[in-house]
Image (tube, grey):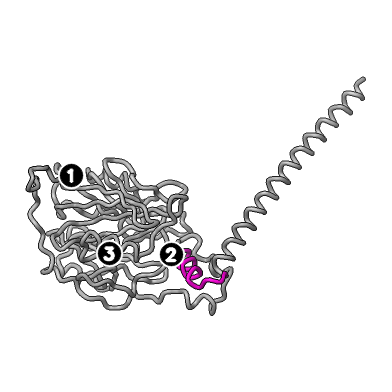
Amino acid sequence: MDENLKRTDRKRKKRRKNVFGRVMAFLGITLLCLLLTVFGLLWVAIKGPSPTLTGIWCNSLRETSAIRWIPNLYLSQEELAPYLMQSTEDVETAQVNTSLIHIAPVREKSEDGKEIPVVELEDIAYGACKGKLLTIHDPTRVILGTSDNFGSAPGLQLTELVAKYSGIAGTNAGGFIDDNGRGNGGTPTGMVLSKGEIIYGSPTAKYNVIGLTGEGMLIVGTMTGQQALDAGMKWGVSFTTHDGIASSLIINGEVQTQNLGPGVNPRTAIGQTQDGDLLLLVLDGRSSKTLGATLWDVVDIMQDRGAYNVGNLDGGSSSVMVYDGRIINDCASVTGPRRIPTGFIVLGEEGEANG
C-alpha cells in the first residue's frame, strides 16, 4: 500500500512538472514571437522603402535617452548619416529683441464684462497631436522652480515642485542627467538661473538658454551665462537634444528651421506673444492615442496662437503638465512621472509675483 502511494505521489509531481514546463515553454515562445514581431516591424519601418519614414523613426528613437541606440542595430553609420540632424548647439542665434514685445496690462474683465482669468487652459488637437496649452496673461506669474541640492539629492516630481512654490500650474523645464532613463533626476544639464543668479553652470560657458526676465520677457538663444544675466534674465534653463540640436524654435517671429526635425515624440515648449502672454505647451505621445509631435508641429501650434519667441524644453517621458494639483496630460513614462530638477511654475494670486 505504501508503495502504491509513493508511485501515485511521483506521478502527481511528474504531471506538475510537465504542466509547469509546458506553461514556461508557451510563455517563452510567446515572448520570442513578440520580440521577433517588434524586431520585424522596426526592420520594415527603418529599412523599408520609404526614406521619409526611415528619417522619422531614426530621429524619433535618437531623441530618447534609453533606446536611442536601436537605429544602430539596423543601419551602418554610413546608412544612418543622411537621416541625422547636424548639431546646432554651438551655432550663434539671433538675439531676442525685447523691444518688440509689449506686455499688455492685466485685464480682469473683457469689453463685454466677462471675467478674464490669469491662466487659461486649452485642449490641443492638431492633426495627430494631442495635449494641453496654458495661456498666462500675467507673465510675471511664471517663475522657475528648482529641486534642492543639485547633484547630491533626487529631483522632484512636477506635482511636488509645483506644490513647493504653492503654484497653480506648471510644466517640466530644462534637461537633466538621467543615465539609461533610471537616474534620480537631481542633476541638471547646462545652466540653471534662479532669482537673477546662476545656481548651476558657469558665467563664461555658452548654453542654449530658455528663460524669463524680471518683467516676464521670454528670451531664447545661444549665449553665455553672463550674457543671460546682462540681458536681465531672472529665471532660466538650458536644453539641447542628445544629438546637440539647439532649443530655439522661433526668434523675433522667425522660425529657426535648422533646429526642427522630423522626430515624433512627446514635447514641452514655452512661447510668448507680442502682447506678452506666455504659452506653456505639452504634447503627448508614445501611446495608442497619439505617437507624439514633431518640432514643426510645436511651431505651427505656437504660431497659430501668436507666439513670437518660442523655446523647446525637455520632452519625451519628461513632458508633464500640472494644473490644480494634478497631472492633466498623458505622461509617457511607464514608471510614472519622472523626478526632475527644474520646472516652470505658474504662481497663483496669493503667490508673490515673480518669486
Instruction: Tell me where residue 149 appears, x and y as whole percent.
Output: 31, 53
Q: Whole-Å distance between the Cαs marked 2 and 1?
A: 34 Å
Identify residue type, mark 2. Glu
- Res 327 → quadrant: top left
Q: Which residue in the structure is indicated by mark 3?
A: 311
Residue at 88% x, 26% y is 6
Instruction: Tell me where residue 105 appears, x and y as whole percent.
Output: 7, 54
Q: Whole-Å distance between the Cαs marked 3 and 2?
A: 17 Å
Instruction: Tell me where residue 10 appears, x and y as whole percent.
Output: 85, 31
Magenta residue span: 48-61
Instruction: Tell me where residue 348 appears, x and y as whole percent.
Output: 18, 44
Which circle's residue, 1 or 3, is located before the other in the chain?
3
Q: Please tell me whether mark 3 sits on a helix, a strand or a loop.
A: strand
Quarter in which the N terminus is drawn: top right
Q: Please tell me whether mark 1 sits on a helix, a strand or a loop.
A: loop
Give the crowd class for mark 2: few <14, some 14-19, many >=20 residues within 10 Å.
some
Q: Is residue 201 left or right of residue 78?
A: left
Q: Is residue 156 left or right of residue 225?
A: right
Q: Are marks 2 and 1 in contact (CB under 8 Å)?
A: no
Q: Which mark is residue 63?
A: 2
